[in-house]
Structures are given as C-alpha cells and as structure tokens.
Image: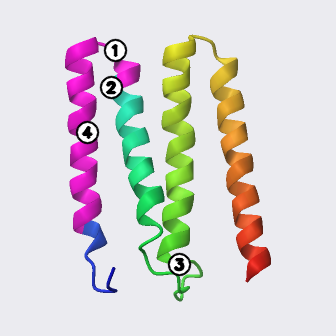
C-alpha cells in the first residue's frame, strides 16, 4: 500500500468491528470470557496481517510501523488467545503455556529478522 494510507482510520474501523463481534458473541453465548477474548484475537490478527503492508523503515523513535504492529499483534494474540484457551480448556495451566510459547515464537521471529539485517 502507499505510504499515505491512513492506518489510524483503518485500525479504528477494525477495532469497532471486533468489538461488535464480541458483543454478538456475548448475546449468543452469554460468556464474558468469549466476549472479551474473541475481539482481542480478531484485532491482533488484523495487526499481524497489516504489518506486511506498513512502513518498514525505522523512524526517529527507533522502530518501524511494521515492527510495532508485529509486537502489538503478538502481545494481543497472547492475551486474547490465553483468554480463549482458558474458556475452552477451563484450566489455568494451558493459557500460561500458550502465552509462553507465543512469546518464544515472537522472540525467535525478532531474532531472525535482526540476524538478516
């Protein structure tokens, strides 16, 4: 995409869509965990996918738009995914393991990107 893409408006629209999906899930299922976890996972997936189209050049604050979107996406995916894993597994150990594995995957991804630069 071009460099003048208004990512703020697109991100805001996606946040509203994910919140609407969470409200629909709460209306259908009645579970707060599903209503909170699903919008976080939807929004984090958007952040991860949009990182491929964002600017890769580092700015004066040290990171690129793409790198920030990847970090934010992985962080939200760890949080929202852990909520959903807890909802479906009903055990606390599985979400903890899920979040640790996802953090390790992110660290390996960043290490490989740094090594290629």
Task: Return the residue nearer the eye: 24 or 52.
Answer: 52
> Quick one: label 1, few (<14), some, or many (20+) residues within 10 Å?
few
Kindly check if marks 2 and 3 are in contact, taking CB atoms under 8 A apart as contact. Answer: no
Kindly check if marks 1 and 4 are in contact, taking CB atoms under 8 A apart as contact. Answer: no
Kindly check if marks 3 and 4 are in contact, taking CB atoms under 8 A apart as contact. Answer: no
> Quick one: label 2, few (<14), some, or many (20+) residues within 10 Å?
many
Residue 101 magenta-drawn? no
Residue drawn at 77 percent across, 66 percent down? 111
Q: Earlier in the sequence, mark 3 or mark 1?
A: 1
Find numbered disc 2 in the image and state the secondary structure of the residue it sits on: helix
Q: Which residue is mark 4?
A: 19
Residue drawn at 41 percent across, 73 percent down? 53
Q: Earlier in the sequence, mark 1 or mark 4?
A: 4
Q: What is the quadrant of the N terminus in the image?
A: bottom left
Residue drawn at 28 percent across, 31 percent down? 22
Q: Which residue is mark 2?
A: 35
Position of residue 61 measured from the top left corner of the image (x, y, whole percent)? 54, 82
Q: Which residue is mark 3?
A: 64
C-alpha span from label 1 to label 4: 14 Å
C-alpha span from label 2 to label 1: 6 Å
- Specify start and end residues of the magenta stretch as a single range: 9-34
Residue 33 magenta-drawn? yes
Kindly check if marks 2 and 1 are in contact, taking CB atoms under 8 A apart as contact. Answer: yes
The answer to whether residue 43 is above or below residue 55 is above
Find numbered disc 3 in the image and state the secondary structure of the residue it sits on: loop
Disc assigned to residue 31: 1
> Quick one: label 3, few (<14), some, or many (20+) residues within 10 Å?
some
Kindly check if marks 4 and 2 are in contact, taking CB atoms under 8 A apart as contact. Answer: no
Find numbered disc 1 in the image and state the secondary structure of the residue it sits on: loop
């Amino acid at each position: 995409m071009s460099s003048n893409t208004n990512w703020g408006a697109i991100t805001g629209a996606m946040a509203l869509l994910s919140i609407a999906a969470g409200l629909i899930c709460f209306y259908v299922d009645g579970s707060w965990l599903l209503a909170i976890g699903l919008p976080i996972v939807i929004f984090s997936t958007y952040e991860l996918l949009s990182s491929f189209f964002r600017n890769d050049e580092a700015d004066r604050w040290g990171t690129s738009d793409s790198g920030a979107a990847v970090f934010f996406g992985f962080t939200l995916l760890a949080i929202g995914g852990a909520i959903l894993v807890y909802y479906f597994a009903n055990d606390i150990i599985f979400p903890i393991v899920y979040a640790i594995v996802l953090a390790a995957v992110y660290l390996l991804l960043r290490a490989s990107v740094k090594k290629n630069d």
